[in-house]
Amino acid sequence: MIAVPDENRSLLEALIGDGRPLLRLTGLLLILSGLFAFFLSATRHFLPHDVAHLGMTSEELCTINECRIVHFMIHDRVSFGGTLLGIGILYLWLVEFPLSQGQAWAWWLFVLSGVVGFGSFLLYLGYGYLDTWHGMATLALLPCFIWGLIRTHGIIERPAPPHPSPVPRGTPPGGEGGLRGRRPFLLSHRPASPSAGIPCTALADFSCW
C-alpha cells in the first residue's frame, strides 16, 4: 500500500522526513570534507590559521629539516581526509540499508560514532591548537546530526514482548517434569508379593499417564 503524503506538512518537515535525509546529508558532507582534505594535501596548501599558528608558509617551513615536517603534515591531512571519506560512506550505507529496515544496532552505531567523532574535537583543549575551519564545520554539522538521530529513533523496531507458550491439552499440573518424577518413585516402592503388586502397578500407571 502506498502511503499518502500529508499535504499539511511544511517544506522543512518534508525535507527532514523521518530523519534519514539529515543523516544522509551528514555523510555527504563528511565525504566532501575528506575530498577537500585530499585537495589541500595534493597542493601542499596550508590553511590561514595554519600559517598564523606556525608563523610561516609551507614553502618557508619546507626549508627546515629537509621538508620532513611539511611531509608529515601532508600525510596527517591525507589520513584525516581518508577517515572522513570512510565514515561518510559508512553513514550512507547505514542509512540506506540497516537503519531503513529499523535495525536498532545501526542507530546505536550512529550514536557511538557521533560521541567519539564530535567529542574528539574537544582534544584541542589539551594541545592548545584550535582549527577554526574544523570547528565551524563541526558546529554546523552537529545540529543536523543530532536532529537526525532524534527523528530516526522513531523508526527503530521495538522487540515484541515474549508470549507464554501454550500448555498442551491434558497435561496435568506440574507438566511433564512432575510426571516423570512420580513414576520411578511409585514403581520403586512396589511390594515383593505378586498379588499385592497389582494395585500398586495400576496406581503407578494411572499416576504417570
Image: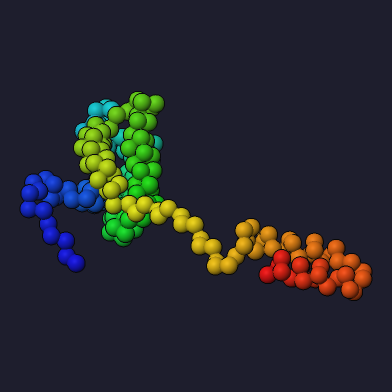
The image shows residue 25, relative to residue 169, as above or below, that is above
Image side of residue 138 versus residue 177, left or right: left
Nearest the camera: 56 or 32? 32
The residue at the point 68 percent across, 59 percent down is: 178
Q: Quadrant of the N terminus?
A: bottom left
Image side of residue 18 versus residue 109, left or right: left
Q: Quadrant of the C terminus?
A: bottom right
Q: Position of residue 160 (x, y in %)?
A: 40, 55
Residue 205, picture quadrant: bottom right
The residue at the point 34 percent across, 54 percent down is: 157
Q: Position of residue 87 (x, y in %)?
A: 33, 50
The image shows residue 102, relative to residue 81, as above or below, that is below
The residue at the point 12 percent across, 57 percent down is: 5
Nearest the camera: 47 or 100? 100
Instruction: For residue 190, say whether it is visible.
Output: yes
Instruction: For residue 83, say whether it is visible.
Output: no
Image side of residue 29 versus residue 193, left or right: left
Nearest the camera: 160 or 202? 202
The image shows residue 132, relative to residue 174, as above or below, that is above
The image shows residue 184, relative to residue 120, as above or below, that is below
Q: Position of residue 181 (x, y in %)?
A: 73, 61
Q: Position of residue 61 (x, y in %)?
A: 31, 35
